[in-house]
Image (cartoon, rainbow, N blue to C red):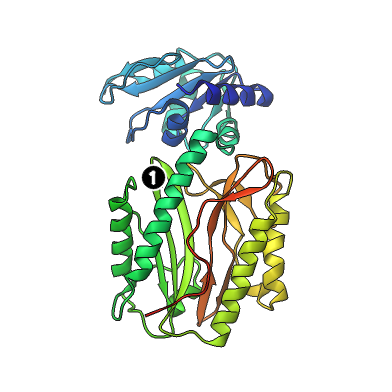
């Protein structure tokens, strides 16, 4: 049991006025216990009390090692698992995960009418947004892996290779380098690169194409995520001009990261560069997203975010310019807020590259 993390969650619960919380997100349970499993349709829940006591409810199909500080209660197929959980609840406010299936919650409310359920995910989410030294080390390692994969992916570009073929190469490279699983990557050639979330298809790379590679994978459960854009065999003056604007925006966003800065101000620092270059209306998304056990998690780095940058927060800096029916450029790095500034996890070059 991760006692320091558990105590942070319990403190958040106290501040929220929640005495009991059901955590059902497998990643949040892993964050607190180092136990990960996919329960399918079976009940899998961690009950946390505001005194930092914890009880794990799970099916006998998933035996685990006993942990100090964690009570484990098993049920079998055919048992009323919800009734077992109900016996350990007080008739008061009950925090529940935002993703807990309604069939479990409705059954629980039928058995305990006095319960007052509220969304309690924030107690765990607020703890998870501040990465500890162990987590930062894992994310640093994951990004180093991603840097290596990016280099090999770019070197794999050749005449005739399709977006889907390169997706397969990147996914295999991730696994070969130690990622937990293969993911469907974003590989975008030419006109496809003007769509921020283009679906890779059978287009083959051609001379003059922008090649946008947004690659990501979990490594020891923690995600890496980066984007680079290169040019195949040639690049026009406008392509290089747009690239320079995006690179400058990326660097400006990174430079704005420091404890106490608002996420909105970080977004503005990058967005202003693109606006001054004359491409403001073509930067169509937020600057970045939080990352950790989920590839997208709090905090949000956008013009409307009210979050304040604090040490331990990890998020992406990924400005982009997307010219309709032409091409697009995006450059993405992961960063962590430090006590006195920022650390950039990615080191793969951001200098413009013409490949082939």
Is 155 situated above or below 58? below
Is 199 situated above or below 16? below
Q: Position of residue 18 (x, y in %)?
A: 62, 22
Q: Position of residue 259 (x, y in %)?
A: 71, 44
Q: Residue at x 33, y 35 (%)?
A: 38
Is 10 situated above or below 325? above
Q: Position of residue 283 (x, y in %)?
A: 62, 69
Between residue 19 and residue 237, name the one nearer to us.
Answer: 237
User: Is 122 left or right of 202, judged from the image as shown?
Assistant: right
Q: Residue at x 44, y 75 (%)?
A: 192
Local crowd at mark 1 within 10 Å, few (<14), some, or many (≥20)? many
Between residue 292 and residue 245, name the one nearer to us.
Answer: 245
Q: Residue at x 52, y 37 (%)?
A: 98
Numbered label tally: 1
Is 50 situated above or below 27? above
- Dot 1 lies on which element? strand
Q: Is residue 101 visible?
A: no
User: Is 335 left or right of 99, judged from the image as shown?
Assistant: right
On-image quarter of the N terminus: top left
Q: Is residue 174 visible?
A: yes
Between residue 308 and residue 109, name the one nearer to us.
Answer: 308
Mark 1 — residue?
219
Q: Position of residue 75 (x, y in %)?
A: 31, 18
User: Splitting the image into 4 quarters, where does residue 74 fall?
Assistant: top left
User: Is 338 left or right of 333, judged from the image as shown?
Assistant: right
Q: Residue at x 62, y 24 (%)?
A: 13
On-image quarter of the C terminus: bottom left
């Amino acid at each position: 049991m991760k006692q320091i993390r558990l105590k942070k969650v319990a403190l958040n619960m106290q501040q929220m006025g929640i005495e009991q919380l059901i955590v059902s997100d497998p990643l949040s349970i892993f964050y607190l216990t180092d136990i990960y499993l996919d329960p399918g349709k079976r009940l899998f829940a961690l009950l946390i009390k505001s005194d930092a006591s914890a009880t794990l409810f799970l099916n006998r199909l998933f035996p685990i090692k006993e942990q100090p500080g964690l009570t484990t209660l098993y049920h079998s197929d055919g048992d009323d698992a919800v009734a077992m959980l109900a016996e350990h609840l007080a008739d008061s406010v009950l925090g529940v995960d935002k993703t807990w299936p309604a069939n479990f919650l409705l059954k629980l409310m039928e058995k305990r009418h006095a319960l007052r359920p509220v969304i309690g995910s924030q107690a765990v989410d607020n703890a998870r947004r501040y990465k500890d030294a162990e987590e930062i080390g894992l994310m640093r390692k994951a990004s180093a892996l991603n840097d290596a994969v990016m280099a090999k992916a770019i070197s794999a570009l050749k005449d005739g290779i399709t977006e889907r073929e390169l997706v397969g190469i990147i996914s295999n490279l991730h696994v070969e380098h130690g990622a937990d699983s293969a993911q469907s990557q974003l590989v975008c050639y030419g006109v496809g690169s003007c769509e921020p979330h283009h679906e890779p298809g059978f287009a083959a790379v051609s001379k003059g194409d922008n090649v946008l590679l947004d690659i990501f994978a979990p490594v020891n459960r923690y995600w890496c995520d980066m984007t680079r854009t290169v040019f195949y065999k040639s690049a026009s003056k406008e392509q290089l001009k747009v690239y320079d604007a995006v690179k400058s925006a990326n660097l400006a966003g990174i430079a704005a990261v420091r404890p106490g800065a608002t996420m909105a101000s970080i977004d503005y620092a990058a967005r202003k560069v693109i606006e001054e270059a004359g491409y403001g209306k073509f930067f169509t998304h937020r600057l970045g997203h939080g990352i950790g056990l989920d590839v997208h998690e709090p905090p949000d780095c956008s013009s409307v975010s009210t979050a304040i940058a604090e040490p331990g927060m990890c998020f992406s800096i990924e400005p982009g310019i997307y010219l309709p029916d032409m091409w697009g450029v995006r450059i993405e790095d992961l960063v962590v807020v430090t006590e006195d500034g920022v650390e950039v996890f990615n080191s793969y070059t951001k200098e413009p590259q013409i490949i082939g």
